[in-house]
Amino acid sequence: ISACLVGSEMCIRDRYEAATNGFPMVRPLFFHDASDPNLYKATDQYLFGEALLVAPVLEKGATSRRLYLPKGKWYDFFEPGRSYEGGNWIEVELHADRIPVFVKGGAVIPMLPVFENTARYPGAQLQLHYFAAAGSNTSQMYEDDGANPAALQQKQFELMRFVGTQNSAGNSLRMSSTGTFKGKPQQRKVDLIVHGVPQPKQVLLNQKPVNGFEAVETGGWRINEIVWNGAATTISWR
């Protein structure tokens, strides 16, 4: 996945949760589920927020490592064509250029195109990676001007909400936004990348058919440059 990841959008969102709910950014596996005894045994793994699971490599020269995935569907972040059913211990191959990271099924991971520094922060562009899973799942993204240290207290921020739904009635991603701040983009160009779902026959934007969607190598599909002004918008497919 070629984009600027966790250092910006995920960290900002999780800091918002920490400030408003008291949730730590880095969490033990049992933080959201105290009923699974295996989560207490997996002490060399952690959750980054609610959606990402990180399994550091602690053994020099290791070519594989054993890890535990909580209940539910999980995707390999770097190879999203691979998914796993949680509630199981698995053995994964290790790579010299990365450590194992997994994404919780149902999560939307907001990302940005690569940029050189915060002065060139591309706020009017957004990549949404939706890791499809059964049911309805909600993700959030926090955004402010990056300069006001009292933005949260002064309510000078935007909170974007993404609701992914996958059930017998259909498949969709709903985007909505509340709040504002100085310099907030009037509209954004959104690239949506859906993992775990083959290329559909039809994609609808607010119930109107759109073209330009295509398959991706990892087995999912994408549609580029959806113009979004922050109003409630639903992308559905079948």
Image (tube, rainbow, N blue to C red):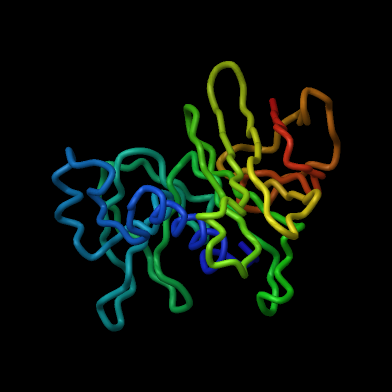
Q: Is residue 235 visible?
A: no
Number of numbered tags placed on the structure image:
0
235 relative to 102 in the view: left or right:
right
- Comparing 91 with 232, the one in front is 232
The residue sitting at the front extreme is 154
> For the N terminus, which image quadrant?
bottom right
Kindly identify the residue that appears in the image at 68 percent across and 49 percent down: 180
Percent x, y for residue 121?
A: 70, 69
- Comparing 28 with 123, the one in front is 123
Q: Is residue 34 visible?
A: yes
- Comparing 107 with 100, the one in front is 107
Kindly identify the residue that appears in the image at 50 percent across and 44 percent down: 107
Q: Quadrant of residue 36?
A: top left
Kindly identify the residue that appears in the image at 26 percent across and 52 percent down: 29
Percent x, y for residue 98?
A: 45, 73
The residue sitting at the bottom extreme is 60
> For the C terminus, which image quadrant?
top right
The residue sitting at the top extreme is 169
Percent x, y for residue 26?
A: 33, 61
Q: Is residue 154 above or below residue 3?
A: above
74 relative to 151 in the view: left or right:
left
92 relative to 233 in the view: left or right:
left
Percent x, y for residue 28?
A: 25, 56
114 relative to 35 in the view: left or right:
right
Kindly identify the residue that appears in the image at 53 percent across and 45 percent down: 140
